Each structure stands twice: as C-alpha cells, then as structure tokens.
Image (cartoon, rainbow, N blue to C red):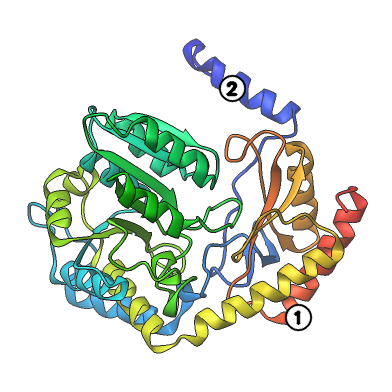
Amino acid sequence: MPRAQLQYMSDELQRLREQGLYQRLRVLESEQLPVARFDGHDVINLSSNNYLGLTTHPKLKERAIEAIKKFGVGSGAVRTIAGTMALHMELERKIAEFKNVEASVVFQSGFTANAGAVQAIIGPEDVIVSDELNHASIIDGCRLSKAEIKRFPHKDTDACERTLKEIAGRRGRKLLITDGVFSMDGDIAPLPQLVDLAKKYECVMMIDDAHASGVLGRNGRGTVDHFNLHGRVDVQVGTLSKAIGSLGGYVCSTSDVIEFLYHRARPFLFSTSHPPSVAATCLAAFELLDEQPQLVQRLWDNTRFFKEGLKKLGFNTGASETPITPIIVGDAALAHQFSRELFQAGVFAQGIGHPTVPVGKARLRTIVTATHTCDQLSQALGTLETIGKKLGVV
C-alpha cells in the first residue's frame, strides 16, 4: 500500500485504467530494427525515430568499440572542469561544418539543448513568441527563462506578425521560436516567412530542427538548408538521437553565442559530458551523411510509398509532409485500443493522446525508416487496414 501522501498518484493511475488510457512501457529485446522484438513479439516497427537505420550501422558500432578501447567508457566530469575530450571538440567542429555555421555545442539530449539554450539567451525582461505546437523542451525552456511567453496559432504567420507588432515598442529582447518539423503532426514550419518576420521586428530567430536533421535538406542538413536560409537563422537546435542514431543534442550559432552557452547554459554546466563511445558514433554518423546521400533518398522513397498506401485505405494522416505520419483517430481510448490490437497482429504503432496532443486529436504516430522494405511496409498496411476496419477507424 502506498503512503497516504502518495495515494493520489495511485488513484490517478486507476482512473487512467478505467478510461482505457493507461499505457505500459514496451520493452525492446533486440536491436532497433525495422522488424524488432518487443515484449516477446517480433513486430514491424513503425514507432522508432531511427530514420536512417544508423543505430545498428556497422561503422558506428566499430567506432564506438574503438573509442571505448582508447578512452574508456566515460568522461568522468562536466565539460567545464575535466570532461571536455578531444572527441567532443571534433564532434562540435563536424556539426558546425555540416550545418554551415560558425560553431556548435553538444548537450546531453535534444531536450536539454532546447531548454538550456532558451533559458540562457532570454531572461525575465524579455518576450518569447512561440508556435503553440512547439515541442515540450521549448515550452520548458521558455518557462525556465521567466520571460513573457506569447503563443501564436500553429503556423499562422499573420497571427505571429500581429503579436510581434503588439510588442514592437517594448524594452527587452525578443525571441521568435519554432520547430522545424513538428513531432506529432509531421508538418514543416513556414520558416521563410518567420525568418522575414524576425528580421522585420528585430527578433532572435531560433529553430528546433530535431526531426528535420538527417531528413530534410542536402544530405539531411535540415530545414534551414531545405529552404536555403543559411545565415538567416540565429540559433539552430538539433538532436543526435534520431536520424544520427545515437544520443544527445546540439546548438548551432555564431562563435560568440556558443562561447556564451559554454558559460551560461545550465545543462551544459552541470551535466557530465558524453561518453567517448557516443561522441565517436555521432562523428561516424555525420561522415555517413556526407558520404551516402542515398540513405536520405531511401527514407523518402519509403515515406512516399507508405503515405500513398494509407491515403488509398482512407486513413486520415493530417497535415504530414515528412516521414512522421499520424493516423488520426480522435478518441484517445480508441487510439490506444487500435495500437494494442495492431501490436498483437504484428505491427508496432504507438497510440498518442492528451497531453502529448490536444484532446480529440488522438492518433497513432507512425514513422518509416530508410531500412524498411516495401514488403514490410505492405504487410503493415494490410494489418492497419484489417484492424482499422474492425474498429471503425476506416
């Protein structure tokens, strides 16, 4: 029995069970592959962020092993004391080169990169203008900054400009911030228009490109490259745990901004740096992106095949423009039931409900990878059709 002061959490969990919203963690028992073993079942995996299949790439494995043998399993300190290794500096130089910026800094996760950067560059006297569907890490960074936060309706650049006009005469700095690709809907930010607004109203322009890096642009250089906006976005955030296949996050900007984050970004200052094996695998991944553009091409070939199949079956995929393809269900309990029955039939597509997405917009969130085969995707589509018809989704 829980202690009396903890009972409220047990009660809330029971309510989730009664509403059909309780979820248990799926446990991966194999490599993160297109067909992977979860909870004792081999299933077609449509729930991984492993866009390019790099989590299991031989080159990344080899580099991790080499780094462990040469440098050990950990760095032993935070970056600002004794934990900055040559590998970390090499990785930051490689990311900056890849993103066509002056400098970059690596964080322990994409979440801490966003939260740490926003909190460091914006303060209580400032104003943040943010897309209403920005990632939770942006939201938390905004809150930590203690700045005033003004949200504009998703991708509504007219509403964004009205907000910027309202605050134009105010003292303090202004930050305009958006995801590059939105993680639940798979749509792309109207970055050219937002960049123009940031210039017009003298805002710092910041983008979280976690789901665009390795996906959009030349060799996966991201949304800024996709729209050819180099030099016009002040701060770019990315992740090393999705298309790059490893772990961590990073911030790209001018050399001075990165030096400032070295001194003021709290997650950087107070977290032990990446293990040598992680830094080495990330370096190998960026090398592969430069050497093998066909990885990104295969990802998009599979994405088009799968999206076309879903639309032919009558599924609602929302506004998706990328490999993130939601199957909109509406009711959260139905979405979770759909996900459970698919899993039993051999397809893993995670159900997502509130608070991750708005009430009434529950969905399955699917992502194909460059390493899925057409046969696997066709089989998944057939299973989706069978279970979808059974539950009245299509």
Q: Amino acid at mark 1?
A: Asp
Question: Where in the figure is residue 358, as x and y percent of width and height?
Answer: 63, 36
Kindly state the secondary structure of the residue where label 1 is placed: helix
Residue 375: assigned label: 1
Q: How many marks?
A: 2
Eyeballing the image, is 40 above or below 150? below
- Classed neighbour count for the residue bearing mark 1: other residues with Cα under 10 Å, few (<14), some (14–19), many (≥20): few
Q: Is residue 162 visible?
A: yes
Question: Where in the figure is residue 257, as x and y percent of width and height?
Answer: 17, 54
Residue 10: assigned label: 2
Eyeballing the image, is 370 above or below 341? below
Kindly state the secondary structure of the residue where label 2 is placed: helix
- Residue at the location (75% across, 34% down)? 20
Going from N to C along the chain, the mark reached first, 1 or 2, is 2
Locate residue 275: give its quadrant: bottom left
Q: Is residue 1 visible?
A: no
- Residue at the location (43% across, 34% down)? 163
Locate residue 27: give its quadrant: bottom right
Task: Tell which tag, 1 or 2, sits nearer the viewer.
Answer: 1
In depth, the one of 287 and 25 nearer the eye is: 287
Which quadrant of the figure contains the C terminus? bottom right
Tell me the distance, in whole angstroms, between the alpha carbons under discs 1 and 2.
44 Å
Residue 2: assigned label: none
Question: Where in the figure is residue 47, as x and y percent of width and height?
Answer: 61, 59
